[in-house]
Image: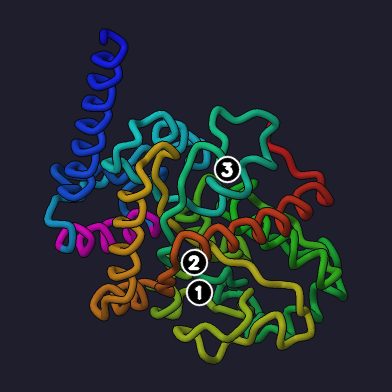
Amino acid sequence: MRRHFRLATALLALAASCASFGTSAQTYPAKPLRWVVGYPAGGGTDFLARTTGAQLSQQLGQPVVVDNRPGAGAIIASEYVARAPGDGYTVLSADNGVLVYNSALYKKLNYEPQKDFALLGMMGRSPLVITAAPSTPFTDARALIAALQREPGKYSIATAGVGSPHHLALELFQREAKVSLLHVPYKGGAPALQDLMGGQIPLMMLDLPSGVSAVKAGKVVPLLAMSAERIPQLPNVPTARELGFTNVEAYTWQGLAVPAGTPREVQERLSTELQKTMRDPGVRQKLYDAGWEARPTNAPDMMAYVNAERQKWHALIKSRNISLD
């Protein structure tokens, strides 16, 4: 009799727990969401998060609060979210560095991208572009390539820093085009762009969201796009593929992730709402104007994309002996 009573009690408790969870999933979200960004306010990643978050907030009926936690190539933010409760109320702007590069650049990380995060989907991407200062003689890509091949090591080029998408795009370009440039890594894209516009450095590997205003104002000359097709915002700029470098393709991209323990029902709700947000005409136009390409993508497709990126870039990082330890 006592055994039957204990069994009945356990079954009632389990049923209550399941009912509670079901109600929780159905009523989600019941409070504001924290959106963690691993870069300072005002940059391209921050803009994408705030633009997307504003629309997502309307759809979910709860505030989405952006929490900037910059530092160490977004490692600080990544570690914070990896240890956050898996309740669906903390999300992370997850980019190339967070999900792909860092695990190859550092021997030890305090988070594991493949184990600590659940991917919700892509938000946007932008190709890397080789740009020149207006004071240089470079006005087109073919002349640039010819000069680089004729005088290896003569020209310097700025990037946003060692291990950044810009740096790795440069390494890929040099390998495939068989050219050599003097890499000048800056602490971020903003100071590099200032020196490019001022003529202190002749070339820069630029992401369009960081320099779209400068390009529109003629303060920077875009020469070559690291994309499969021409960039809609820069229709006159040829791609590396057009010049015969078929393997030169590099983007800075952003997706959304949550702690791995987040309930599946909550992940699916957020993924569905994210895709809806990225298809919103108003959001897409704002991103386009800022140099982004909206990329509505579900979780499985994002996982496939990230896995392909890991294979590609980990091999390059190893072959070029790049390390941040």
Amino acid type, callout 2: Met
Q: Do residues under tags 1 and 2 come within 8 Å of each other at their CB atoms? A: yes
Residue 289 relative to residue 144: left or right: left
Alpha carbon distance from label 3 to label 2: 39 Å
Task: Count neighbours of disc 3 (C-alpha within 10 A) and say few if under 14, some if 14 to 19, many if 20 or more.
Answer: some
The colour scheme used to paint the residues is: rainbow
Relative depth, front residue between 25 and 285 = 25
Which dot, 3 or 2, sits closer to the camera? 3
Q: Do residues under tags 3 and 2 come within 8 Å of each other at their CB atoms? A: no
Q: Which residues are magenta?
A: 44-58
Alpha carbon distance from label 1 to label 2: 6 Å
Where's residue 232, x and y in %? 47, 86
Residue 227 relative to residue 60: left or right: right
User: Which quadrant: the C terminus?
Assistant: top right
Q: Which mark is residue 220?
A: 1
Residue 159 relative to residue 170: left or right: left
Q: Residue furthest front?
A: 1
Please indicate, yes or no, whether residue 292 appears anywhere in the rendered image: no
- N-terminal label among 1 and 2: 2
Alpha carbon distance from label 3 to label 1: 38 Å
